Image: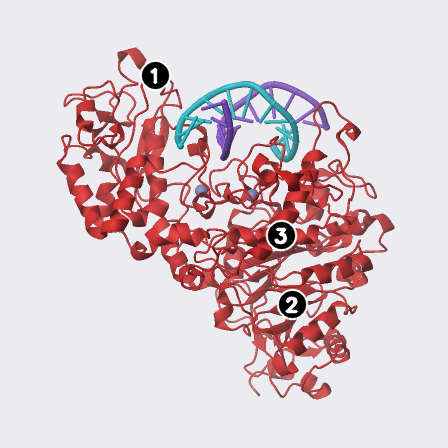
Chain colours: A red, B cyan, C purple
DNA sequence: GCACACGATGAG
DNA sequence: CTCATCGTGTGC
């Protein structure tokens, strides 16, 4: 408990902290923290609250409510930015750092110099071997990965990459680069982030800040020189090579000739001209086990394949140090590479390095979120240090072992249940901690008192107390190209209803991307894809979004499939929205979430379909997102209103109040209502605006100024369905799915009893 | 197979 | 010595 208490307290603190933080880009940490508020311990209800909104902040621990705050006392705001030591974030080699500094100070010229120097150095011959086994890409960095979306990491089962891609407009455009090349990311980051953030908050160093400087300038493709610099050299103190070090005070800087070991095939620093075996393969050390295959980065996107020995201990030989360096641009990501090289070549340093790709957002992240379970476990955050794991946000997306699990985010709780079947209907579910850092799971919120909340002695089992936590949402922070938020909406049904179709249970995703589009998708089956064009471009960074829907019943009805819900089931019934932040860190909480939350909780702790939080992902730009009093009022009113089933209000930057039908089962699943300032509204179906002459508009006022108007419209819409268009069987190849084509003037929304509008029914005529 | 707790261990 | 975490035994 204490831990949890601590955590909780820490969470709170964070929020507080956050408040102090100016707006700014730094939001990464801040954002998270803020979310904590939702977690207010006092109420179990939290769980119900759309966890997704509670970004990382809350872990189960936080959720657990009662915690007191021992932590608060201890906790001082840990320096998130502080460098991780030891196994922590691999620090740049001193030399590298020094060089970087020099470079910074002197400018690009330095880089070249350094390079030259290196080359000139004694072992100038080195590097030849490098290219031999080059591979285009490092395995982990899957070229195809959509950079931005979380879905990428999600389990195959639930999400298919394609889908993901679709979800994010960014991905769609293809603008994003699959590769995780640091440079790319960096550049993107810098572009988006830096401008706005510039120096706003002093308190926390925003990610961009520390990354930015070096990156920005260089973000563009690396120059050849840069690569050169990256050469890694290894030397052992003992070895003759040491003399090489000479110029550099630090041995690390030595440049060695890299060769492929005849014995193991791995690259190694040749100590002598005739060396053919790496140290390990030399007589004395040959015993080593089979070499591991490692990848070494040779160029921007090139990787060399090499082999190294298993992490053995290099201790005996004082560590080899690598040298090198690269220009700053690489630094950000580059340093990663250095490190990688080192690790790989050396002997895979082991643990940590293996768990870091160094180029993903997580790896690049320098700060602990302070709100995730792992962070909260840290003493610096007032935790008990039991878990001893890296911040969730810093867990490598590619190599963290914690990661490889299927992100729950993508799974529907229900499915899990079905699979596991461990839980009995009606029984409180156990909360599980997700190992996958990125895992976002909305499940289990309903079970208030889980093991976790209970004191340890309550645990049925033995010595170890099992904590069940879950991440409501995971987000990738960092700006980069993928700045968008994904929210997972799971419609869960009561346990009893397990038998019900899976489809309904499939989670829907709400995605806010850089383009400002808010998308809702259902990962699994057919996707429901919403795009709300209305959001201003400016808001691309990530507009703050607030969702609301206080109607518990509506949720329960979800899909109408769910039968009567058992009282206790509520947790499953709730509409869960998990938010995954892919792009930039959430910078702030602009919204009065506090106010909203309490209310909701009060209303329906259990079913809480309500999602109310505003996130500002904008990195630097915190958005000032303009708020239109009128709209906000309407929004707040809607919040307190029971909207027709599954309609959720979303306050997006613009400001635009958007109403989304979150149930894919609804005929209005693809429909979005956007209310702008002045209450003018627009209805879009599958991203297409309804023609102004549509009868729906005729039936309702031009402006939706009141809740009544909105509800009325929603009800009206519920009586309609989406035009299926006309199927063109002649088009496309046989194996292609049939194409449904809508007439240019398609009504989009038609009476429920009809399948298609007139225009689509008789395309020719139209 | 997963999650937890904690020993182990490299880096400062 | 401390910190940050990785890797792993163990309970589930
Ligand atoms: Zn964290
Ligand atoms: Zn990584």
Which chain is disc 2 placed on?
Answer: A
According to the image, label 3 marks what residue?
Answer: A15
Q: Is A375 on the left-hand or right-hand side of A298? A: right
Q: Is residue A735 visible?
A: no
Is the C-beta separation of discs 2 and 1 under 8 Å?
A: no
Instruction: Report the disc number at residue A287.
Output: none
User: Considering depth in this image, is A221 or A640 the residue closer to the camera?
Assistant: A640
Q: Quadrant of residue A265?
A: top left
**Image marks 2 and 3: residues in contact by CB distance under 8 Å:** no
> Residue A509: image x %, image y %?
61, 58
Disc 3 chain ID: A
A130, above or below A56, in the image: above
Q: Residue at x 32, y 21 (%)?
A: A318
Q: Is residue A527 above or below residue A15?
A: below
- State how far apart marks 2 and 1 are (Cα): 60 Å
**Horizontal and vertical percent for residue A53?**
64, 56
Look at the numbered discs 1 and 3 and tell me whether their residues touch, using CB distance below 8 Å: no
The residue tagged 1 is: A316
Assign a secondary structure to mark 1. loop
Q: CA distance from mark 1 to mark 3?
A: 47 Å
Please report, as a chain letter, where disc 1 is located.
A
Seen from this angle, which residue lies furthest front?
A73
Q: Please give left or right for residue A702 compared with residue A499 in the image.
A: left
């Amino acid at each position: 408990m204490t831990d949890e208490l601590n955590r909780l307290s820490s969470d709170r603190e964070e929020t507080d902290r956050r408040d102090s933080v100016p707006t700014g880009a730094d939001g990464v940490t801040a954002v998270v923290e803020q979310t904590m508020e939702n977690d207010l311990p006092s109420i179990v209800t939290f769980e119900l609250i759309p966890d997704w909104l509670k970004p990382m902040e809350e872990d189960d621990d936080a959720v657990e409510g009662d915690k007191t705050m021992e932590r608060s006392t201890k906790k001082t705001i840990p320096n998130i930015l502080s460098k991780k030591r030891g196994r922590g974030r691999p620090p740049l080699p001193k030399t590298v750092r020094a060089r970087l500094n020099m470079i910074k100070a002197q400018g690009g010229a330095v880089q070249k110099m350094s390079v030259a120097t290196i080359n000139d150095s004694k072992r100038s011959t080195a590097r030849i071997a490098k290219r031999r086994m080059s591979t285009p890409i490092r395995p982990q960095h899957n070229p195809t990965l959509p950079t931005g979306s979380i879905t990428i990491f999600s389990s195959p089962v639930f999400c298919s990459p394609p889908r993901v891609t679709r979800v994010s407009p960014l991905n769609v455009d293809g603008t994003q680069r699959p590769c995780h090349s640091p440079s790319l990311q960096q550049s993107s980051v810098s572009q988006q982030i830096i401008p706005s953030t510039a120096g706003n908050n002093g308190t926390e160093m925003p990610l961009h800040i520390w990354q930015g400087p070096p990156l920005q300038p260089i973000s563009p493709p690396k120059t050849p020189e840069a690569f050169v610099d990256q050469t890694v050299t290894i030397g052992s103190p003992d070895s003759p090579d040491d003399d090489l070090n000479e110029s550099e005070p630090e041995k690390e800087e030595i440049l060695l000739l890299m060769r492929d070991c005849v014995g193991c095939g791995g690259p190694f620093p040749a100590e002598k001209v005739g060396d053919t075996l790496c140290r390990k393969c030399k007589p004395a050390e040959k015993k080593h086990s089979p070499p591991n295959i490692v990848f070494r980065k040779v160029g921007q996107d090139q990787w060399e394949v090499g082999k190294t020995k298993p992490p053995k201990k290099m201790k005996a030989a004082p560590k080899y140090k690598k040298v090198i360096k690269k220009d700053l641009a690489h630094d950000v990501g580059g340093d990663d590479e250095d490190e990688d090289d080192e690790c790989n070549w050396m002997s895979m340093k082991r643990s940590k390095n293996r768990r870091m790709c160094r180029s993903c957002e997580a790896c690049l992240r320098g700060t602990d979120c302070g709100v995730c379970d792992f962070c909260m476990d840290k003493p610096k955050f007032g935790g008990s240090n039991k878990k001893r794991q890296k911040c969730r946000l810093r867990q490598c997306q590619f190599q963290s072992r914690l990661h490889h699990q299927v992100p729950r985010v993508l799974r529907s709780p229900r499915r899990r249940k079905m699979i596991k079947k461990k839980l009995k209907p009606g029984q409180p579910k156990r909360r599980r901690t997700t190992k996958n850092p990125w895992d976002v799971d909305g499940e289990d919120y309903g079970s208030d008192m889980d093991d976790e909340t209970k004191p340890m002695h309550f645990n049925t089992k033995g010595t170890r107390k099992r904590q069940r936590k879950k991440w409501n949402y995971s987000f990738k922070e960092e700006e980069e190209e993928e700045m968008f938020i994904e929210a997972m909406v799971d419609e869960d049904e009561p346990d009893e209803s397990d038998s019900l179709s899976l489809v309904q249970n499939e989670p829907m995703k709400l995605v806010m991307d850089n383009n400002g589009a808010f998308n809702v998708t259902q990962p699994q089956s057919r996707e429901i894809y919403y795009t709300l064009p209305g959001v201003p471009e400016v808001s691309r960074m990530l507009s703050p979004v607030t969702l609301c829907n206080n109607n518990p019943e509506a949720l329960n009805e979800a899909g109408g499939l769910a039968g009567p819900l058992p009282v206790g089931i509520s947790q499953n019934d709730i509409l869960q929205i998990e938010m995954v932040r892919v792009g930039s860190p959430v910078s702030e909480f602009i919204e009065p979430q506090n106010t909203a939350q309490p209310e909701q909780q009060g209303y329906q702790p259990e079913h809480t379909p309500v999602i109310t939080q505003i996130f500002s992902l904008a990195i630097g730009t915190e958005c000032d997102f303009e708020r239109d009093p009128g709209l906000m009022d309407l929004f707040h009113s809607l919040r307190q209103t029971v909207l027709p089933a599954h309609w959720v209000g979303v306050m997006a930057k613009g400001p635009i109040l958007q109403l989304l039908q979150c149930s894919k089962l609804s005929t209005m699943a693809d429909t979005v209502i956007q209310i702008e300032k002045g209450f003018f509204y627009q209805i879009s179906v599958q991203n297409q605006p309804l023609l102004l002459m549509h009868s729906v508009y005729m039936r309702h006022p031009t402006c939706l100024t009141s809740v009544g108007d909105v509800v009325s419209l929603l009800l009206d819409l519920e009586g309609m369905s989406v035009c299926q268009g006309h199927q063109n069987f002649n088009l496309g190849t046989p194996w292609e799915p049939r194409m449904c084509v809508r007439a240019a003037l398609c009504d989009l929304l038609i009476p429920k009893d009809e399948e298609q509008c007139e225009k689509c029914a008789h395309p020719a005529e139209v």
